[in-house]
Image (cartoon, rainbow, N blue to C red):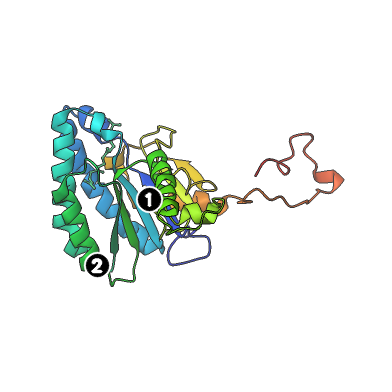
């Protein structure tokens, strides 16, 4: 199936856990740092492929709230590298029409990284192409806890009416309030985990786990994942009663009627 151009089967929002930089490097006798450098190239070609496929929102996990547990050397490298990558790549991404957004928490995050992310947001603010959201110092559970605490504070100060919380009202307090739900969630490296990435936003995402380490991820992997997505039957909890004629029944293992 072709994924070229914008068809209705192209997911509007793809989220990616770019996993496997360290293993890719170590398998080659290199340091983890070299793996992250190769990861940058993979990220750029993935953004290019996503634009060509017609993906409107691409959200990538660059640094999690749990990544502070890594060695001080790797944390320092990743902070510096995030800042450097954003600085070096912003104008290129701008020329591709990409709108860069940062999603993440301020506490602990290096101010120089925040400054660079904010500068990239400003530079690309008027672009109307693919929205690239860089999740830097992001964790989904703390995002939800922060949202609830902010709602409590806003109720206390009279800014928010003291009414029961709804999915819609909570959604407006999430860091991702400007993003639609995730349609396709991709993780590279063969690991099959969410790792605290976009839990709320991926409630009905389709998951594709790609058995390749992130530095080897390319346009073919992205397009293959999009093709898998296009072939899935998304029901969002609903179900359609479509009994097969007797001659086509497959016994008890009927697909419909699952939890969606
Ligand atoms: C996961 O691989 C990757 C990260 C924690 C960082 C992602 C960083 C990049 C893709 C580098 C370039 C992009 C930016 C935005 C700086 P891992 O280190 O967990 O690999 P492992 O599971 O093999 O140890």
Instruction: Give the mark nearer the N terminus: 2 vs 1.
Output: 2
Q: Is residue 30 visible?
A: no
Q: Secondary structure at mark 1?
A: helix
Callout 1 environment at 10 Å: few (<14), some (14 to 19), or many (20+)? few
Q: x, y (%) of residue 249?
A: 80, 41
Q: Residues within 10 Å of mark 2 (few under 14, many from 20)?
A: many
Where does label 1 land, which residue?
220
Above or below for 128 versus 154: below
Tag 2 secondary structure: helix
Please indicate whether residue 232 sits to the left or right of residue 219 in the image.
right
Residue 172 left/right relative to 52? right
The residue lying at 41 percent from left, 54 percent from top is 154
Residue that carries the numbered disc 2 in the rendered image: 124
* Ligand 1 occupies quarter: top left
Q: Nearer the viewer, residue 237 or 213?
A: 237
Give residue 236's position: percent from left, percent from top. 62, 51
**On screen, 96 above or below 190?**
below
Real-space Cα separation, disc 2 to disc 1, in angstroms: 27 Å
Q: In the displayed structure, would residue 164 be above or below residue 251?
A: below
Residue 73: tell me if it is visible. Answer: yes
Cβ of mark 1 under 8 A from ligand 1 = no
Quadrant position of residue 33: top left
Residue 80's x, y, as percent? 13, 44
Report x, y in % for residue 151. Answer: 44, 51
Quadrant containing the C terminus is top right
């Amino acid at each position: 199936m072709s994924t070229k151009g914008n068809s209705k089967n192209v997911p509007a929002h793809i989220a990616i856990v770019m996993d496997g930089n360290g293993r890719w490097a170590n398998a080659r006798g290199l340091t983890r740092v070299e793996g992250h450098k190769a990861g940058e190239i993979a990220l750029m070609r993935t953004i290019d492929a996503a634009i060509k496929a017609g993906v409107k929102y691409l959200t990538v996990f660059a640094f999690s709230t749990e990544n502070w547990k890594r060695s001080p050397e790797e944390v320092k490298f990743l902070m510096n590298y995030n800042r450097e990558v954003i600085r070096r790549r912003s104008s290129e991404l701008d020329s591709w029409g990409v709108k860069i957004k940062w999603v993440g928490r301020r506490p602990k995050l290096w101010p120089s990284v925040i400054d660079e992310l904010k500068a990239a947001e400003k530079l690309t603010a008027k672009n109307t192409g693919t929205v690239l959201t860089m999740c830097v110092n992001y964790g989904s559970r703390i995002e939800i806890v922060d949202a609830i605490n902010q709602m409590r504070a806003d109720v206390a100060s009279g800014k928010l009416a003291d009414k029961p919380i709804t999915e819609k009202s909570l959604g407006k307090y999430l860091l991702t309030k400007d993003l639609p739900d995730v349609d396709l969630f991709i993780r590279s490296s063969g690991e099959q985990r969410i790792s605290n990435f976009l839990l709320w936003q991926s409630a009905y995402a389709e998951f594709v786990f790609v058995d390749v380490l992130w530095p080897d991820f390319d346009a073919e992997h992205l397009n293959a994942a999009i093709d898998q997505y296009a072939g899935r039957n998304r029901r969002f909890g609903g179900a359609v009663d479509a009994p097969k004629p007797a001659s086509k029944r497959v016994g008890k293992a009927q697909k419909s009627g699952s939890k969606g």
